[in-house]
Image: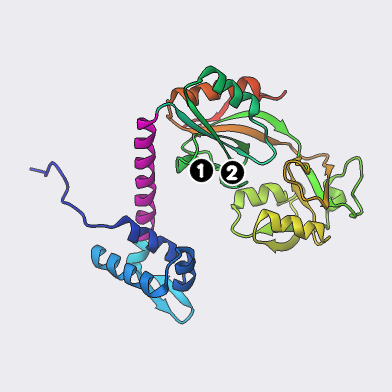
Amino acid sequence: MSERFPAPVDLDLRLVQCFTVVAEHQHFGRAAEALHTTQPSLSRQIRRLEQQVGARLLDRTTHGTRLSEAGEVFLPQARGLLRTAVEAMARTRAAARPSSITIGYSKGLVITAAVRALRDRNPDAEVHTRLLAWNDSRGALLEHRVDAVVTRLPFPTDRLRVTVLYDEPRVLVVSRDHRLAGKESVTLGDIADEPIPHVRQSDPLLNAYWRLDPRPDGRPAPDGPLAEALEDKHELIAAGQAVAIGPPLDHATGLHPSLTTVPLRGVEPSQVVLATRTGDRSRLVTAFRSLAEALLTGPHQTGPIHTT
């Protein structure tokens, strides 16, 4: 006869998190810095975890740290444990506060009309907004940091319900003294040899989309300098070292003051979307979805593009 309850497991999730950070950095020193602790303390925590698991998870080498065979098996399970714990806490807190919603949005997108209408129709609700990093929409939703997001495609849409609100043209971003600055419009042919920067640790899907890599004729996009973050990319463009393709930001919504944009012809527009978690039946999420579709929709409205 099978046991009704599994045997108790002594596994400290704080130690599990430490392990995943070391695995990500492959270096105890950098991992300790990221965790705001010391290397000796981090080493002790990893040893405690290995005692709890009953296996060696990490091997130190002359070049850093690598996963053992057992560590390779444990890492995806560890990440899954942390995701499950975060989701369990978020769902519990949401159940305790059913009249609260946090709405995320990307830079340059205005959600005021729908947020204001949601507050007007639900005066007792807590309605919060949060500006998200350009590549954080999916993570913020699945980690329950936000309950709905107005953002731009592309990003993986599994476990999400995504509705296209409207199309948004892609533009060329250049320095104000660039040879193409001030043109009425440009084509990909005009920038065939212009270097396009990479952002370190960028999602490959996003990277290829905004670099237009490969180009329609199959050629790769010209390689440009490596940037640590979006702001660093803007500095590279302002210095004349590269150009970029992006959404139509202006100086009020985040464009560097030394940059300007030029309309880009012959390129499919990006899509602004509303995303929520699949199966989220919160009345405020449902209400915001209806308001966003009614008030934030441009001339190219379509229906849901992915529901799982």
Residue pictured at 62% horizontal, 29% vertical: 164
| Label ID, residue 140 | 1
Specify whether residue 209 is painted magenta. Answer: no
Where does the image place residue 218, in percent across and percent down from the top left? 74, 51
Query: Where residue 159 appears, x then y in whole percent?
Result: 46, 37
- Compared across the picture, whether 28 is left or right of 215 comes to left
Badge 1 amino acid:
Ala
Outermost left residue = 1
What residue would you read off at disc 2?
Answer: 132
- Asked whether 94 or 52 is in front, the reply is 94
Which of the pair 36/137 is nearer the observer? 36
Magenta region, residue range: 74-97
Residue at 47% in and 22% down: 124
Task: Work out which residue is located at the far top of the displayed protein and give it.
Answer: 121
Q: Secondary structure at mark 1?
A: helix
| Residue 76 image point, x, y percent | 38, 55
Quarter of the rendering occupied by the N terminus: top left
Which of the marked residues, 1 or 2, is nearer the chain's N terminus?
2
The magenta stretch spans residue 80: yes
Residue 300 at x, y percent in the picture: 70, 25
Residue 149 horizontal side relative to residue 29, left or right = right
Q: Which mark is residue 56?
A: none
Badge 2 marks a residue whose secondary structure is strand
Residues marked 1 and 2 touching at CB (< 8 Å): yes
Main SS, magenta residues: helix
Q: Is residue 125 above or below residue 82?
A: above
Alpha carbon distance from label 1 to label 2: 8 Å
